[in-house]
Image (cartoon, rainbow, N blue to C red):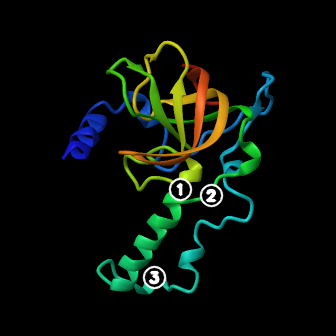
Amino acid sequence: MRTFFLFFALVLLHPAHAQDYTLGERLKPEKTNTTALRQLNWDELAAPGWDPVKIFKGLKLDQLKDEDPRAMEALERMKEEWRNAPPNPALNGQRVRIPGFLIPLDGTRTTVKEFLLVPYFGACIHSPPPPANQAIHVVVKGKPVAGMRIMEAVWAEGDLTLHGSDTVMGSAAYKLIADRVYLYQQPGKRK
C-alpha cells in the first residue's frame, strides 16, 4: 500500500517540464567535457558482454498473448535478470559525471537527499524499472539539493562504487556519492 501512495504522490508532483521529453527519451551527453571528471554514458554501466534481452531469444513474442503462461514466465525471468544485471567492474571507485532523470527516494516537495538516477524519461514511473546496471542510487553529500522534482533532468557528479541496493522504485547496481547535482540543459534550448 505504501508503494501505491508513493507512486500516486510522485505522479501528482510530476514536473511541468515533463512535456520537454518523451517516454523513453535519453539525454544527450555534452560533446566537450569541461570538467576533470570522467563523463559516462549509460551503455558503459553494463558489464561487457551482458545482453539484456538474451532471455527473449527464441521466443516468438509477437505470437504470445499477455495471459500466455510462456509470456508470464518470460516476464518473470526478465525481471529477475534485470534485478541482477551485472555492473561494469572497471567503473568501481571512479570520479564521474553522468546525465539522467531523477527519481526521489526521500526529501520533501522542494529538496532531495537521495534519489535514483535513471537513463531515460519515464523509467520507474511510467514503465518498468531499468536493469539494475542502468540505475544509480545517488546520495547527496552535504545539504539536500533544492528545487528538484520527479523526472528532473540533471547531471550528477561524484564518486561511483559498485554497491547494489533495492528501493521501492527499483534496483540499482551502483551508488554515487554526489558532490554536485545540477540541472541538465538540453543542447540548443535555453531555460
| Marks 3 and 2 close (CB-CB < 8 Å) | no
Taking 101 as reference, is 131 above or below it?
below
Would residue 163 be found to the left or right of residue 5 on screen?
right
Asked if one can make out residue 188 in the rendered structure from this viewpoint, the answer is no
Amino acid type at mark 1 = Pro
State which mark lies toward you, 1 or 3. Answer: 1
Taking 119 as reference, is 15 above or below it?
above
Residue 23 in picture, x, y percent from top left? 46, 48
Question: Which callout, 1 or 3, points at the residue further toward the start of the chain?
Answer: 3
Q: CA distance from mark 1 to mark 2?
A: 9 Å
Question: Which callout, 1 or 2, points at the residue further toward the start of the chain?
Answer: 2
Would residue 28 be found to the left or right of residue 64 on screen?
right
Residue 158 in picture, x, y percent from top left? 66, 26
Amino acid type at mark 3 = Asp
Asked if one can make out residue 148 in the rendered structure from this viewpoint, the answer is yes
Question: Which callout, 3 or 2, points at the residue further toward the start of the chain?
Answer: 3
State which mark lies toward you, 3 or 2. Answer: 2
Which of the image's four quarters has the C terminus? top right
Would residue 5 be found to the left or right of residue 128 on screen?
left
Q: Residue furthest top?
A: 143
Element at label 3 = helix
Instruction: Name the residue that disc number 1 marks.
Output: 131
Residue 150 in picture, x, y percent from top left? 40, 32
Residue at image coords 58%, 70%: 53
Element at label 2 = loop
Q: Residue furthest left?
A: 1
Instruction: Name the residue that disc number 3 marks.
Output: 62
Instruction: Name the residue that disc number 2 marks.
Output: 86
Q: CA distance from mark 1 to mark 3?
A: 23 Å
Amino acid type at mark 2 = Pro
As rendered, which of 142 and 24 lies closer to the eye? 142
Q: Quadrant of residue 168?
A: top left
